[in-house]
Amino acid sequence: MNDNEKYYTLKTIRRIWKSYATGSTKLLLIALSCNAIVALTTPALPELIRRVIDDIFVNADRSMLTILPLVAISIMLIRAAGTYGANVAINYIGQRIVGSLQKDLYKSILNSDLAYINSIHSARFISSFTADSSKLRETMSSVVVNLSRNILMVAGLVGYLFYVDAILATIFFIVIPPAAIGLKFLGKRLRKAIRMSLEEIGTLSALVSETLKGIRIIKAYGKEKIHLRKASEVIDQVVNFSMKGVRARSASAPIMEIVTGVAIACIIYYAGNKSLDGLMTVGSFMAFTTAAGLLYDPLKAVANLQAMLQEGIAASQRLFPILDNKPKIQEKENLKKLETVSGSINFENISFSYSENGKHVLKNISIKIKSGQTVALVGPSGAGKSSLLNLVPRFYDVSSGKVKIDNIDIKNLSLADVRSASALVSQDTLIFDLSIRENIIFGNENVTDKIFQKVCKDSLVDEFVKDLPDGYETIAGESGVRISGGQKQRIAIARAMIKNAPILLLDEATSSLDSESEKKVQIALDKLIKNKTALVIAHRLSTVRNVDIIYVIDKGIVVEEGDHDSLIKKDGLYSFLFKTQFPESAVEKN
């Protein structure tokens, strides 16, 4: 491990404790105290054996037959209480640390920009919550408790060994440094193997996620073998890296076995000579070998703990980049307050790119939308319509220009104010795995039953919910799998009605529906739009014929504007798009 890696490891450990364990000082003191008790009573065991052999079996002291058994029971009771207290205390600390870290991780994801979220596969985040967090929990709850206990135990036993015979103890510890060097080398290899293994697990999670979402397409195109091969390759990589970690981790115990064997051989030779010369009693020799034997487990545990610590560090190195991500969309100081919102929107000469040095997807666009107007954005796929709409709730920041709500630059408003001013209904409606009622109110606990019933009636949700066995308590399923596309859209419209925001953002809200579902959703949309400012994106141009004004966007530029009739007469891009969707006779009638 080079200096940078060592620094990063120590920095990571320090950060975990500083950020997540500062409130557990009392528990930590309890755990350390309990571990100290266990450590201090451990050397008492070989001393007890020495007294038993020398006092009872050699010196035949009958009084010790009563004293020493009581001492043995007392030692074990004290050790049992100390072990229990330490385990509970530090495991509690470990669980608290990981719980707090997961909360911060979730908060970081919620606060992250859409650009950052979209740049990472969703399975990567899920892997951080599962595999990485579990690995870190194992480190915190297992490594820390054993590390603190075993270090104290080693210290106590080492002290006892020197108390029994300093020269013999010195011989024993001469062979320890080579083991430390070997363990240090193994730690470096182990951390690399674990980190790569976790990366591959993230890749596997992504593949499984995509397979579950696209299982119909996979089966329809007969691509099961291709995906099975991909999964097999990734799983083989996971196994490969995991086995590298297993080999590195498994090598630590044999190293300690060899070192201990050499040490014991040296002890037998030296102690045997002293015993033959009458300089060491049988009890002292047995006490020394017992203490050396007791030292083996904590030393081996420390060796394995070092390996486990590297696993935890590897996991944390994948977690911390997510925690440390700083949103690019930041609120300024001295923000203005958005009072009663009328709903006007101004795009003032805005340009936008998804990356700092990337190509502009919107170029010098200026659009004024008056309060209460319904404005449509029309154009070919990839023209920049959704990009423009996403600037209103400040999902992204403009590269240049200004976006204003009620003539106030949204950068001078809080994100809460900006986003409370609008409601979004999109093509890919997200339905949570909750009841239909919970999906509609969406955390708004202040909704009265009267308002809820009116909203459900206006959005035509009541029309299909009344036929469900559990009514509004029906669980929608993952991504709303138990309800149809049209029903999902009506729930989304009801959700927007509940929010009752002055600005509505409709991103192709009916494009994926059949004619019957579209008709019902359009009725609900008409009620939703009433007396509100609406920015509508639509591929089906029949849905925007009656809007106040249409802006036609192509390659990031507004190329036409006007109402339906005037744009048809211009015979430009809008007219071309309209003619591709409707027969020539329909155009002529208009």
Image (cartoon, rainbow, N blue to C red):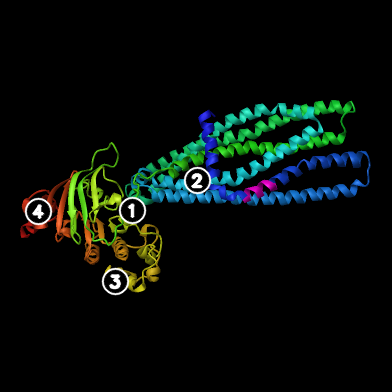
To which residue does mark 4 refer?
567
Q: Rounded to the nearest whole Å, what is the CA distance between mark 3 and mark 2?
A: 45 Å
Residue 330's mark? none
Q: Quick one: SS at disc 2?
A: helix
In the image, is residue 468 part of the stretch drawn in magenta? no
What is the crowding at mark 1: few (fewer than 14 residues within 10 Å), some, or many (at least 20)?
Answer: some
Which of the image's four quarters has the C terminus?
bottom left
Q: Is mark 1 in CB contact (under 8 Å) with mark 4?
A: no
Mark 2: amino acid: Ala
Residue 432 pos. (x, y %): 38, 59
Q: Is mark 3 in CB contact (under 8 Å) with mark 1?
A: no
Q: Quick one: SS at disc 4?
A: helix
What is the crowding at mark 4: few (fewer than 14 residues within 10 Å), some, or many (at least 20)?
Answer: many
The foreground one among 265 and 148 is 148
Mark 3: amino acid: Lys
To which residue does mark 2 refer?
131
Q: Taking 282 as reference, is 565 above or below it? A: below
Nearest to the eye among marks 3 and 1: give it: 1
The foreground one among 240 and 219 is 240
148 displayed left or right of 266: left
To which residue does mark 3 refer?
457
To which residue does mark 1 refer?
414
Residue 327 pos. (x, y %): 37, 45
Mark 1: amino acid: Ser
Q: Rounded to the nearest whole Å, what is the CA distance between mark 1 and mark 4?
A: 38 Å
